Amino acid sequence: MSLIQRVFATAAWFLALLIILLSLVPPSLRPVTDLPHNVEHFLIFLATGVCFLIGYPRKPLGDAIGLAVFAGAVELAQRWAPGRHARLSDFMVDALAALIGVIIAWLGLRFAINIFNRRPSS
């Protein structure tokens, strides 16, 4: 695993842990931003999808499926967290954002590989 992959893999797991913590703490402890609720969800799951794909690039479909399952598990866990609510709409935004993140990173990696593998014409 390259240094860049290790950095992104570490960031991916950090973001996953952050998602769990922010999803399960009481609402009074959750930081508040000026962004709409769905945008907050979208951005953190998009970043997580990008980081997982760059950190673990060999199985993009596995990354996408794993993150969708993760999004569902986080929403279900909120059923037992005081003051939190499991929402199908949150799951849909989260899973879609993670998928888009995986796709963006996959396309970016394919583009970078093509650029670096291009041989100068003589």
Image (cartoon, rainbow, N blue to C red):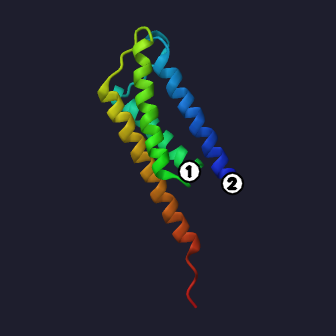
Describe the element under mark 1 as helix, strand or loop.
Answer: helix
Q: CA distance from mark 1 to mark 2?
A: 10 Å
In the rendered view, does 89 fall on the left or right side of 43? Answer: left
Q: Pinpoint residue 72: horizontal percent, then vertical percent.
A: 40, 30
119 displayed left or right of 61: right
| Circle 2 residue | 2
Please tell me which of labels 1 and 2 falls first in the chain.
2
Q: Is residue 31 visible?
A: no
Amino acid type of disc 1? Ile
Q: Which residue is mark 1?
A: 54
* SS assignment at label 2: loop
83 vs 40: above or below: above
Residue at 40%, 24% in the rendered image = 75
Looking at the image, residue 40 lies above or below residue 58: above
Q: Residue at x 43, y 8 (%)?
A: 82
Can you give x and y, in whole percent of width and height, for residue 78 in the image?
A: 42, 17
Position of the C terminus, as image quadrant, is bottom right
The 10 Å Cα crowd at callout 1, few under 14, some 14 to 19, many 20 or more, is many
Q: Which mark is residue 8?
A: none
User: Residue at the left extreme?
Assistant: 89
Tell which of 39 and 53 is nearer to you.
53
Residue 69 vs residue 119: left or right?
left
The answer to whether residue 5 is left or right of residue 113 is right
Front-lying residue, 29 or 92 = 92
Residue located 36% across and 20% down the image: 86
Q: Is residue 106 visible?
A: yes
Q: Relative to residue 112, is residue 48 depicted above or below?
A: above
Q: Quadrant of residue 34?
A: top left
Q: Is residue 107 above or below residue 52?
A: below
Residue type at numbered disc 2: Ser
